[in-house]
Image (cartoon, rainbow, N blue to C red):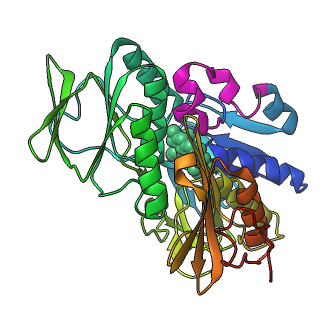
Amino acid sequence: MSGTLIVGGGQAGAQAAFSLREMGYNAKITIVGSEPHPPYQRPPLSKAFLTGSADQESLHFRKPEYYVNLGVDVLCSRRVIDIELGGGATDMAGIARLNDGGVKGFDNLMLAVGGRPRRLDIPGAHLAGVCYLRTIADAVKLLDVLEQGATVVVIGGGFVGLEAAAMARRRNKHVTVVEVGDRLLSRVVASEVSNFLADAHIRRGTNVLLGCGVTAIEGECERVGGVRLSDGTLIPADVVIVGVGMTPRLDLAESLGLETADGIVVDAFARTSDPRIVAAGDCTVMPNPMTGVGLVRLESVQNAVDQAKVAAATIVGRPYAHTSLPWFWSNQGDIKLQMAGLAEGYDQTVLRGSTSSEKFSVFYYKDRRLVAVHAVNRPKDYMLARKALSQGMTVPPEGVADEAALLVPTA
Ligand SMILES: Cc1cc2nc3c(=O)[nH]c(=O)nc-3n(C[C@H](O)[C@H](O)[C@H](O)COP(=O)(O)OP(=O)(O)OC[C@H]3O[C@@H](n4cnc5c(N)ncnc54)[C@H](O)[C@@H]3O)c2cc1C
């Protein structure tokens, strides 16, 4: 038995290995990961790590001995460059070639290759001082340039950008967030939340510029000096953090002829268009787990974990559909945003609490049924709504706005 080969040693890859063993899978498991670290968590990279309160080792899910005891081979700093299916003369399902010349046979294959930060394609994007934030290496580099710089421009007002901006403010940097949309996070949160976040960051000393494109990064002697906006303004900067989204890694899937659509297309059982191959995490698009309709990519720890469990169940022959409730959190300094469900296609929002108190929740409804909640510093609302959503229940919109009213989920 050649066992299971997991390509990618991130959240999804590690979870799949743990789940396979929990499900009684006792053949060989190999994780090949291109980074020089054992699997680690990324969320702290834009949070505690940037203030220096988390070190690299604290990010690792498990110590190397844990994998040894579990019988999981973790090959770090190795990249799978080619995969051949079919096995030819052998009875294996396929073989994978690694960049160091190694070859790994497998019976089961899982792609958990994640994605890379979307790069800016504008003049000056290559200058020293321009940083992205996806890996430990990126975060170490960013910490280093933050040490030396005083003025930070964050391009992109998404979660990673806003979290990094909050951390740079904590380090007393002069921070500007430049967002091309007319409000922050416009695709994922209601305007109440967008407006609150912009105001809250401004209150904490961050300059937030909305509706501003960036045309160039300028500098001298190959070092960044400023960011040129589409209206011609130059914002001085000695550090630029680019947070304009992620691009899923599709090269291996495409070379295998798998269906892709801005992500590796998988079904609810984490099977790719070749049912011999499963995939999970940020690299995939899958049926909306709440409705089963349409394809979504959910870039979150919850999804990577739950989908990896589904993939492991498919591998061991006990498949179940991935229908778990999406949830996500974003800590932007002391602003704790918790989100459950998917705020898509809603026709009503109800605010509970007040944005000025910095403690509020927005309940999202479609045809009077709760589809999502976004809670800022209100964990109780979040937990109640998340539980209701995950049990297929709703919270009637009447009464939600009344803070004194007890919220009671109904069928
Ligand atoms: C800065 C930051 C903050 C975040 N904060 C939050 C948060 O607060 N809450 C939340 O829910 N989510 C957060 N996320 C998202 C979350 O971390 C991701 O959704 C999750 O890590 C996805 O896991 P993954 O295993 O799919 O992909 P990844 O973690 O990207 O892992 C994929 C791994 O595969 C490797 N790889 C790729 N190709 C190959 C190959 N050919 N051979 C070998 N290895 C390969 C890559 O190098 C990478 O190490 C954050 C992400 C970032 C970057």
Quarter, ligand 1: top right
Report whether 366 appears left or right of 259. right
Q: Which of 351 and 35 is in front in this view?
A: 351
Report whether 144 appears left or right of 208. right
279 in the magenta segment: no
What residue is shown at x 65% (from left), y 54% (from top)?
Answer: 304
Residue 16 in sight in this render? yes
Q: Nearer the viewer, residue 128 or 308?
A: 128
Residue farthest along the left direction in this orientation: 232
Report whether 313 appears left or right of 35. right
* Image quadrant assignment for residue 64: top right
* Horizontal and vertical percent position of residue 222: 17, 20
* Horizontal and vertical percent position of residue 108: 70, 59
* Horizontal and vertical percent position of residue 218: 14, 29
* Horizontal and vertical percent position of residue 162: 44, 41
Residue 96 in sight in this render? no
With respect to residue 310, does 289 lie above or below? Answer: below
Q: Give the range drawn in magenta.
A: 40-64
What residue is shown at x 65% (from left), y 82% (from top)?
Answer: 369
What residue is shown at x 84% (from left), y 70% (from top)?
Answer: 318
* Image quadrant assignment for residue 103: top right
